[in-house]
Image (cartoon, rainbow, N blue to C red):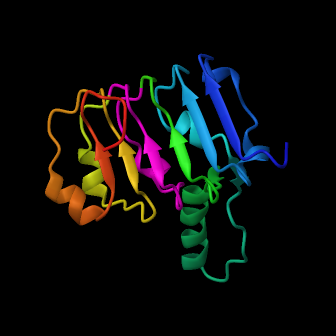
Amino acid sequence: WRNMRKLEIDHSVFAHFSGLTALQVGLTHFRVRYGEVKKMQEVLHDAVMETRAAPTPQANTSVDVWRQAALAQFAEDRIKVRPWVCLLSLDLGHNEIKEIDVPCLELLPVVQDLCLNNNLLTSLQGWLQAGCVLKQLTKLDLSNNAISSLKAERMTRARRGTKTSTGSGGGGG
């Protein structure tokens, strides 16, 4: 499995799959279609690296004790998620995704081709407002969603040179 570069899971309930962490390091193309995926994190957060414990350094003063208690509460049981550093193509078409999860996009630093066609998307507003830029993105397929408006000037400012497909066809733009 270490040499696997492409994984396709079609017409299977994705919730039945787990343990993809072992494949994540070398996977360049990942497709989950007709998998009843409702959120991007169902696919991309499977790669949880570890649960962080709160830090326990020595406290010298009462202020240090208070500060460390506050930090410990904030940091306790946080998960650390490994980014998909080799993933060039992600296809989550034909699922039930309602919104683009910006923290999930941040896990895709080198993705070039993102396909979210035939989902339940209605807006890209959250993504555009967050200012999350996928620097390597060259193709974005949003076709056959219920997106009512797309402000092209915001998309252009966010990423020049990205092909975007929002029409009723199945292909890229």
Q: Residue at x 26, y 53 (%)?
A: 128
User: Is residue 110 part of the magenta span, yes or no?
Assistant: yes
**Left or right: where does residue 115 sit relative to residue 4?**
left
Quadrant assignment, res 146? top left
**Left or right: where does residue 67 sit relative to residue 82?**
left
Does 160 sit above or below residue 32? Answer: below
Q: Main secondary structure of the magenta part?
A: loop
| Residue 102 locus on image (x, y percent) | 40, 50
Q: Residue at x 73, y 39 (%)?
A: 20
| Residue 152 locus on image (x, y percent) | 16, 53
- Judge by depth and name the residue closer to the eye, 18 or 27: 27
Q: Residue at x 47, y 32 (%)?
A: 39
- Judge by depth and name the residue closer to the eye, 126 or 11: 11
- Judge by depth and name the residue closer to the eye, 21 or 31: 31
The magenta stretch is 97-120
Quadrant assignment, res 11? top right
Q: Residue at x 33, y 57 (%)?
A: 162
- Judge by depth and name the residue closer to the eye, 10 or 158: 10
Quadrant occupied by the N terminus: top right
Quadrant occupied by the C terminus: top left
**Left or right: where does residue 74 sit relative to residue 49?**
left
User: Is residue 32 part of the magenta span, yes or no?
Assistant: no
